[in-house]
Image (spheres, rainbow, N blue to C red):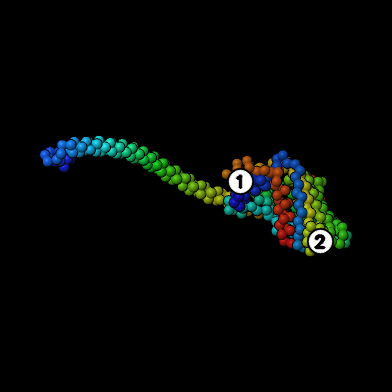
Amino acid sequence: MKPRFFGLFALTLAFFPNAQAGETSISEHHCAPASVQNVHTLFTRYNEYSRMPGAAYTVDLAGVNVELIRMVKSQAKQVSSTGKDSRNNVWMVLQPALVEEGSLYPRFLLDCTVKWTGTNRFDQLCTLQKDKQHFGLDDLRMSVRVIQGEKGCGANQSGIQIDVKMVSNPAHVERIKAGALGAAGVLAPLLSVLFDEDSFFREYFHFIYGEWIKTL
Amino acid sequence: MEIFFYFVNKNSINPRMKKCVSILFLVFMVSACGQANTANEHLGSIDQTAKEMRDELKKTREFLDTATTQSQRIADALVSLQTLAQDMVKIIQTTFVKKPPAATDDIDSVLGGSANEGEKK
């Protein structure tokens, strides 16, 4: 398939969250040519998330580089820190393409904990705080386990296991979709018919982790 | 033929010889007629084949005319598609213009608020 048509395909698959939204997940493993310390530094740069590679998810659509969604805000407040372990509140806001109203941006506050379980390994777990403001997602759990010299990866590599589970909110999704389609003009019927909304967040988180790991 | 009649009319030639030559001549003439008939039949067959080939050529010409018309239509359709694709690119470029993000809450107000805080705004 030609890249530009793949772009259209990806757009149709990835743009909107599903109206019949449910739980969707990612589970992937990478071997990164980096020390566990470097991976830790990268993954805990919470305030930098919106400026890091992968913040903007773009696809090639008929030769045009279209930005589908971008993380426009990532702010962290440290809750506690013990040695190398840490706990932070992380506020994330995503701007979907075509959506102008800020109240329709997917956003959520995460509780992110990092726990070192050995000299060469740590776990990071970020969970959505349901009692705080959130839109688009009702639940999100991002779990990362990093082990340097893990079996299956090279001696100087770190194995990174990523598991993400998310539950989108159907009502919110409909509002985001309406906001986007309202601005889509003549493209609205096409976008409305073709979108498989379920993969929206899944595609984005898959993309963002992939881009981060590429920088290691 | 002239030689034959000269030969037949010549008085100095033996009558038996004349009869024999006459029979041979007759046989020759019959054979020649047969050959001519066969040749005529061949000519008829060639004529039929030529007619069929003419028909085939006519059909081929008609097919080529149709193919040329179809090719022209396809070429026109491709031009239209190219124009459509260019228009599509323009529409996409215009539609997906990158816009600055709208104002959203900061972490401090989110930490101090409740789950539906953003909904009220």
Closer to the camera in the image, A196 or A30: A30
Q: Is residue A209 left or right of residue B33?
A: right
Give percent across and percent down for residue A22. 75, 41
Q: Choose between B93 and B21: the one closer to the eye.
A: B21
Quickly name the residue at label 1: A184
Element class at badge 1: loop
Residue B74 position in % (x across, y down): 47, 45
Say if mark 2 contacts mark 1, CB within 8 Å: no
Residue A130, percent across and down?
81, 46
Label 2: which secondary element: loop
Residue displayed at 80% across by 52% down: A143
Residue A125, visible in the rendered structure: yes
**B26 above or below B99?**
above
* Quadrant of the rendering where the C terminus of chain A is positioned: bottom right
Looking at the rendered structure, the kind of residue marked 1 is Ala
In this orientation, which residue lies closer to the viewer: A175 or A39? A39
Q: Which residue sits furthest right?
A: A82
Residue A192 x, y percent position in the rendering: 63, 42
Count residues near mark 1 (Cα–Cα under 10 Å), then give few for <14, some for 14-19, many for 20+. Answer: many
Disc assigned to residue A149: 2
Between label 2 and label 1, give the one nearer the viewer: 2
Rendered position, B64 above or below A66: above
Residue type, numbered disc 2: Gly
